[in-house]
Amino acid sequence: MIMGSAARDFTPGAQPPTNLAALIEANYGPLADRARTLYAADDALYGAPEVQWATDFGFRCGTVLQLRQHAAAGLTAFSYEFARLVNPPILPGGNIHGLDGGFVFGTFASRSQGTNLLPFATTPEDSALSDVMQRYWVNFVTTGDPNGPGLPRWPAFREPERSYLELAGTGAALKQGLRRAQCDLYIENINRSR
């Protein structure tokens, strides 16, 4: 399995929360103080605290939980983060859910120029990123392993490393522990609620 999310993952048309403190309190209960400290500052990649929260809570950390469960069952999974932030930003969060699909299928350029759906300018880096992503996905479909000649090695997701591939305008880079503190607290809260 390949699973991932965007650095700023928003459902098209969705708005970031307006009262983050109340949302954290309502969703984290006795863990709210710890959660508030994790959503206190803007981040160059992940955006404003409200955008970080919406992505972590709605997309990213649930994906990390599924990857952990998949790996714990002895199955192979590969994790990625699509970190290509478009310019100008797609409001409100800066990207939209599923933007990475256009890069996997090589259709991002035809969907971006002058449309309301993806109103960003494409670059040569986008073409290179799309090529890399297509090669990984074709390898995976063909062999069950995304790795291949000329590509940075993409290890399977495992604990405790939680390796993932960051896919950005600069290409593919191996990273570990995607938003570990935020996702660990999310998973602790899920387990607490059971």
Image (spheres, helix red, strand yellow):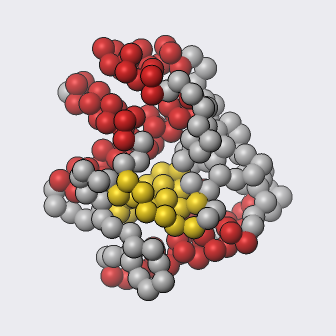
Instruction: Name the quadrant containing residue 46.
Output: top right
- Against 105, is 19 above or below? above
Q: Residue furthest right?
A: 114
- Against 187, is 95 above or below? below
Instruction: Name the quadrant containing residue 107.
Output: bottom right
Query: At x 72% / y 63%, what residue is drawn?
Result: 111
Please indicate whether residue 182 sits to the left or right of residue 135 in the image. Answer: left
Q: Residue furthest bottom?
A: 149
| Rendered location of residue 142, percent (x, y) | 37, 82
- Against 118, is 44 above or below? above
The front one of 10 and 43 is 43
Query: At x 75% / y 52%, what residue is drawn?
Result: 87
Please indicate whether residue 114 sits to the left or right of residue 128 in the image. Answer: right
Q: Is residue 15 visible?
A: yes
Instruction: Name the quadrant containing residue 29.
Output: top left
Query: At x 64% / y 74%, what residue is drawn?
Result: 128
